[in-house]
Amino acid sequence: MRRMTARPGNAHQARLLRLLRDGGPNSRAQLGDQVDLSRSKLAVEVERLLETGLVVADGLAASRGGRRSHNIRLAPALRFLGVDIGATSVDVAVTNAELEVLGHINQPMDVREGPVAVFEQVLAMAAKLKASGLAEGFDGAGIGVPGPVRFPEGVPVAPPIMPGWDGFPVREALSQDLGCPVMVDNDVNLMAMGEQHAGVARSVGDFLCVKIGTGIGCGIVVGGEVYRGTTGSAGDIGHIQAVPDGRPCACGNRGCLEAHFSGAALARDATEAAQQGLSQELAARLEAAGALSAVDVAAAAAAGDATALDLIREGGNRTGQVIAGLVSFFNPGLVVIGGGVTGLGHTLLAAIRTQVYRQSLPLATGNLPIVLGELGPTAGVIGAARLISDHLFSPA
Amino acid sequence: MRRMTARPGNAHQARLLRLLRDGGPNSRAQLGDQVDLSRSKLAVEVERLLETGLVVADGLAASRGGRRSHNIRLAPALRFLGVDIGATSVDVAVTNAELEVLGHINQPMDVREGPVAVFEQVLAMAAKLKASGLAEGFDGAGIGVPGPVRFPEGVPVAPPIMPGWDGFPVREALSQDLGCPVMVDNDVNLMAMGEQHAGVARSVGDFLCVKIGTGIGCGIVVGGEVYRGTTGSAGDIGHIQAVPDGRPCACGNRGCLEAHFSGAALARDATEAAQQGLSQELAARLEAAGALSAVDVAAAAAAGDATALDLIREGGNRTGQVIAGLVSFFNPGLVVIGGGVTGLGHTLLAAIRTQVYRQSLPLATGNLPIVLGELGPTAGVIGAARLISDHLFSPA
DNA sequence: CTCGCTTTGTCCTCTGAGTGGAAGAAGTAG
DNA sequence: CTACTTCTTCCACTCAGAGGACAAAGCGAG
């Protein structure tokens, strides 16, 4: 099948495509209510979109009291690929043009093996999704990587946890391999976009999205747009000092938030506690599995283990302290907590909330929800699909 | 004289007005180089602006090799009033339409006397400027207040250091009294706009502007626009925890940055040191004046007093720590330090720089200038004039 | 001073985007 | 079946804006 080659010819068409993406099938009349164009103009633009094949007719809409309207929808054959590369695993998903996930695969992987090996695996996963009949090809792909990205070029810059990726032309390389447009961004930014599109952050203009996984990062959304900073490293809060003269961190400083709380730090602390005999629950799990991870701590906490709960609370306090500072500074309308560690659930959330509400001023916290992300691992891939669709659904 | 009543009729006219404001008198041809409009269209819009009286002809421009062009400039009689209300003093200035300061008065004052008393004083100062022949009236006024503002309405909300101002309709009241349009914003935001317009931050899209005065605040500029947060309290960094379990703060918490370093904290610490006999320099000044302020500390430091230098370094370290966190989070292209305490100069700046460059990651600090503001006390009033001119020079 | 060249300002025509009205098509309610 | 509503198409009209032609004004060389 021939893939999407057309692009909206003007801002009106781009606007219409986004409305159809976010609102699903719509009649011309409904579209007209949203775009402030005359009926004739609207009809012309819709006609042009139909000609390009980007949208198709889709039966009759329900009557609103008079003649029934013909529905319009995005071409049902359009497919986006969303790729979320984490430190230790990859998520790959296919979506339709409305960004609904049609298929989703997660596989363990180690970013440190370098871009070539990783992309081989990603391409194999994409091929598998294709083979299962979900897509005949991809019209665009969004890629999330766990480190700073020079956004316009789609190239990672000086990523601490993924040496070997520095300067690798991710966008260009994948665009070649996949044969479609590609956009690259930080994984945390994509999570923020995902939650904004389909999760808890719908209808919030300014918010923060804190992702606690192997490391810690923060997506910043200003006026509905992701803010990436001057060099693409905005939101890199893992190395904010949380504890003066605290633990040494891989970055060379002491007391970084990441050194005290993150998937990696939690696993290490839990192992230590188990070895010191502080927790039978954790010791048993250590013996059974040979190593501990954040998941084990979550399980132990769920079973009521005091040591595990303390670790989580302690970490939540640290994180909450840092977030409190960010809330004072940024005054967001919402804070979303997500990432692998969200399995720790409400114990973590409660600790964070306590710190933030205690340390920030009432004006900033008065009406500030602090919630867990509602999309879990699909936030990243939905955000990735959103990224590329935003790009494609903009004037050429 | 009749004051400016006209407003630009469309986005093109607004664009032209801003170009003339920022670039001074310009020929039609030069304007054409900057706006990407056909000569005919440009001529029409300029003609309309001339008709409204917002701009006037201003002699011939220098030849660029051919026929000489007629210059256009903003009406020379236009006057903006910039008001910067601080905790302990007010600045009032008149500018022309190009935002050049024509006259500037500073007077001591106490915000806690409440809005009515303060505005009486402000109006008297404005009248004095008018009486000195600098203006026959004002076409608009920008007001800065030392606390959070609900920006669209121009109303202070829950300002900690100015009780009695909460909810006072500053914009409406002053608009009545002055008989011209008024915009109100946080003083720190205005300082940022001032430095952006006429100071060190020209040509930087994303930057932070830290103002250390009686309190500490931070102006945030994203993509050239001031970011104010969901409730208008963005940049309120004075109450970020700088020292765990540190000094009690007026806000009820402990260890807030403001409790450890600010004009007020510095004065208190210096007084304490003088009383304990740690510094003869400071003790002498205390005896002479009866009280110490940041200015005394600056003077003592300039004279080489070790205690004063220590106080400044200590405060710079604290501030630098907090800024380091903000830099990691926000990844700005520039950090400007301003406010009353800038008299402390390079000792302070060096301490801040040391902390930031040590604690933030190289990607964020690699090309990050940290500099003192170059406008001093005029930054606020210029920012205020800029605020109202941005408002007036936008499509109606 | 005159001539050729360049830039600037004005005028005029042409195009294409977009509006709004009219009329027909296709429904619903009674 | 009738009256009314909503949706769609068609068409004439307006208007912003582009761009070319031409005149006006300045420069420098000879």
Image: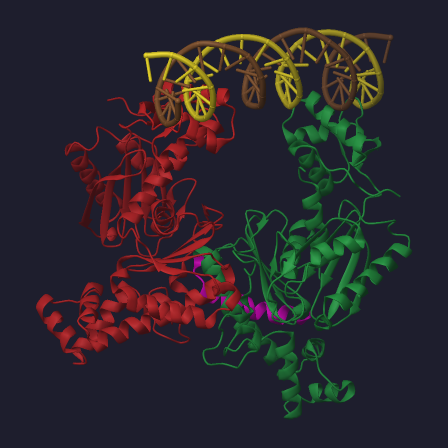
Chain colours: A green, B red, C yellow, D brown
**Location of the C terminus of chain B (image quadrant):** top left
Snapshot quadrant of residue B134: top left
Q: Give the side of residue B60 with respect to residue A97, left or right.
A: left
Snapshot quadrant of residue B121: top left
Residue A345 spot, x, y in % from top left: 66, 69
Q: Which residue sits at x=34%, y=27%? A: B61
In the depicted view, which residue is nearer to us: B171 or A291?
A291
In the depicted view, which residue is nearer to us: A103 or B30?
B30
Q: Give the range drawn in magenta.
A: A343-362
Snapshot quadrant of residue B120: top left
In the depicted view, which residue is nearer to us: A317 or D15?
D15
Residue B360 spot, x, y in % from top left: 48, 69
Q: Look at the image and say whether residue A120 sits in the magenta stretch.
A: no
Q: Give the side of residue B323 with respect to residue A9, left or right.
A: left
Residue D27 spot, x, y in % from top left: 36, 26
Q: Which residue sits at x=76%, y=31%? A: A49
Residue A4 spot, x, y in % from top left: 80, 41
Residue A20 shows in this picture: yes
B140 shown above or below A268: above
In the depicted view, which residue is nearer to us: B222 or D7?
B222
Q: Give the side of residue B292 with respect to residue A186, left or right.
A: left
Q: Which residue sits at x=49%, y=22%? A: B39
**Location of the N terminus of chain B (image quadrant):** top left
Overall secondary structure of the magenta section? helix
Q: Which residue sits at x=64%, y=81%? A: A308
Q: Look at the image and say whether residue A357 sits in the magenta stretch.
A: yes
